[in-house]
């Protein structure tokens, strides 16, 4: 357990920018909450389908109210998913496809990868608000394998640090 600090209450979990985190950085509560919200929204899609809404519009609504909820802050919490949480998320997508709410089966790992690549691509631009968390760029070297950035690769001793968005991006999206 962590030592207490005067005037600051120790909590088991916290909600930061609508993402639920436990004190060990587990996202189990967040995934459970997101999947329950998405299940409620799938019920709404069933009602819309039963009212005669065309399939094209149901797909648009599915992406607007289900996929967008899952994509919120996904580069941050997506790397912490366990295989069980990945399976639960993919089951939601498969069920949605079988019910005809979407035209394609989404995969949570692909969504995490695409969202992280997109955010990192924006982050390396000098005017982006997250650009300041990047290490300073180094002079271009002649490497056998080109990287997509000129930043030095950080030293990673701990898996939690290695899985953080900014560090993970340097290694994966080169």
Image: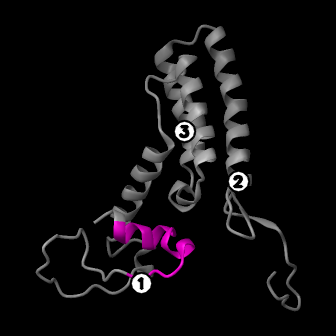
Quadrant the N terminus occupies: bottom right
Is 127 located above or below residue 99 in the figure? below
Q: In the image shown, does 111 or 64 lie closer to the viewer?
A: 111
Of the two numbered discs 2 and 3 on the same chain, state the one appearing first in sequence. 2
Main SS category, magenta section = helix
- Residue corresponding to mark 1: 155
Q: Position of residue 10 (x, y in %)?
A: 85, 77
- Residue corresponding to mark 3: 67
Check if mark 2's residue and mark 3's residue have beta carbons within 8 Å: no
Q: Which residues are magenta?
A: 154-171
Q: Secondary structure at mark 2?
A: helix
Which residue is pictured at 53% across the width and 48% down the height? 71
- Residue corresponding to mark 2: 28
Check if mark 2's residue and mark 1's residue have beta carbons within 8 Å: no
Which residue is pictured at 52% across the width and 59% down the height? 79
Q: Position of residue 59 (x, y in %)?
A: 50, 24
Q: Position of residue 174 (x, y in %)?
A: 28, 66
């Amino acid at each position: 357990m962590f030592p207490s600090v005067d005037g600051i209450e120790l909590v088991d979990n916290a909600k930061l920018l609508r993402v639920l985190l436990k004190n060990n950085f587990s996202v189990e509560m967040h995934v459970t909450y997101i999947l329950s919200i998405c299940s409620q929204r799938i019920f709404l899609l069933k009602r819309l389908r039963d009212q005669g809404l065309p399939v094209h519009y149901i797909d648009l609504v599915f992406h607007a109210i289900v996929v967008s909820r899952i994509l919120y802050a996904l580069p941050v919490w997506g790397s912490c998913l366990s295989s069980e949480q990945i399976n639960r998320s993919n089951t939601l997508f498969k069920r949605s496809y079988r019910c005809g709410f979407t035209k394609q089966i989404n995969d949570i790992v692909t969504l995490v990868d695409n969202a992280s690549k997109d955010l990192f691509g924006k982050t390396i631009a000098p005017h982006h608000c997250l650009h300041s968390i990047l290490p300073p760029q180094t002079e271009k070297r002649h490497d056998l394998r080109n990287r997509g950035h000129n930043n030095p690769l950080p030293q990673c001793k701990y898996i939690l640090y290695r899985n953080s968005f900014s560090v993970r991006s340097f290694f994966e999206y080169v």
